[in-house]
Amino acid sequence: MNVFENTEIASNYDSYYSTEFGAKVDDLEKKLIQDLLSDVPHRNMLELGCGTGHWTKYFAEHGYTITAIDISDAMLTIAKTKQIANTQFIKANSCQLPFSNHSFSLIVSITMLEFVENIELTIQEMFRVLKPHGTLILGCLNEDSVLGQTKHQS
């Protein structure tokens, strides 16, 4: 079961970033991601596990054109309400991406891998759709983190 199909969890997902701690973590994460992206010339990205569009909005505000996927209807519904520019939202399973080989020069996935059922297959799919010499950026949670604990709810 995908815990993020729970409408209540999806609705409250962004509230973490409104807390003092969440805002500090968000600021640090964004600085780190910006550093990682500073040398990447690609402006067209695939975002795997876009959730409510928190990171999608950040990427769009920094000039990226985004294909954002998530498996959760509840999360995608919230993301779409944010009306994020230059973004196409698609419901898809990361274990079976609906794209041709070598479709993207840049793939970013933040806090998704720890929630997929088959990490190995997901990573294989990432490399299948990544162009040769492309850039892959992964952000993963510690299982004991606040969001990591969400996986064990329900």
Image: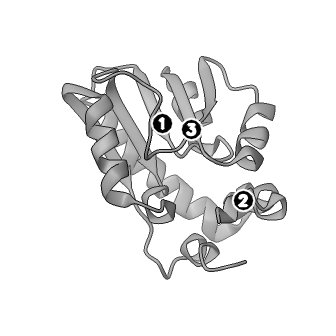
Is residue 96 toward the left or the right of residue 13 in the image?
A: left
Label 2 belongs to which residue?
13
Q: Earlier in the sequence, mark 2 or mark 1?
A: 2
Q: Earlier in the sequence, mark 2 or mark 3?
A: 2
Numbered-mark total: 3
Kind of residue sitting beneath label 2? Tyr
Q: Residues within 10 Å of mark 2 (few under 14, many from 20)?
A: some
Is residue 123 toward the left or the right of residue 25 in the image?
A: left
Please identify the quarter of the rendering in which residue 125 is found: top left
Q: Is residue 150 above or below residue 10?
A: below
Q: Residue at coordinates 53% horizontally, 44% vertically from top-left? A: 93
Is residue 54 toward the left or the right of residue 143 in the image?
A: right
Q: Residues within 10 Å of mark 1 (few under 14, many from 20)?
A: many
Label 1 belongs to which residue?
47
Q: Picture coordinates of residue 41 (x, y %)?
A: 28, 20
Label 3 belongs to which residue?
92
Kind of residue sitting beneath label 3? Ala
Q: Residue at coordinates 47% horizontally, 47% vertically from top-left? A: 30
Q: Picture coordinates of residue 108 (x, y %)?
A: 40, 40
Q: Is residue 14 above or below residue 148?
A: above
In this rendering, which labeled residue sits more in front, label 1 or label 3?
3
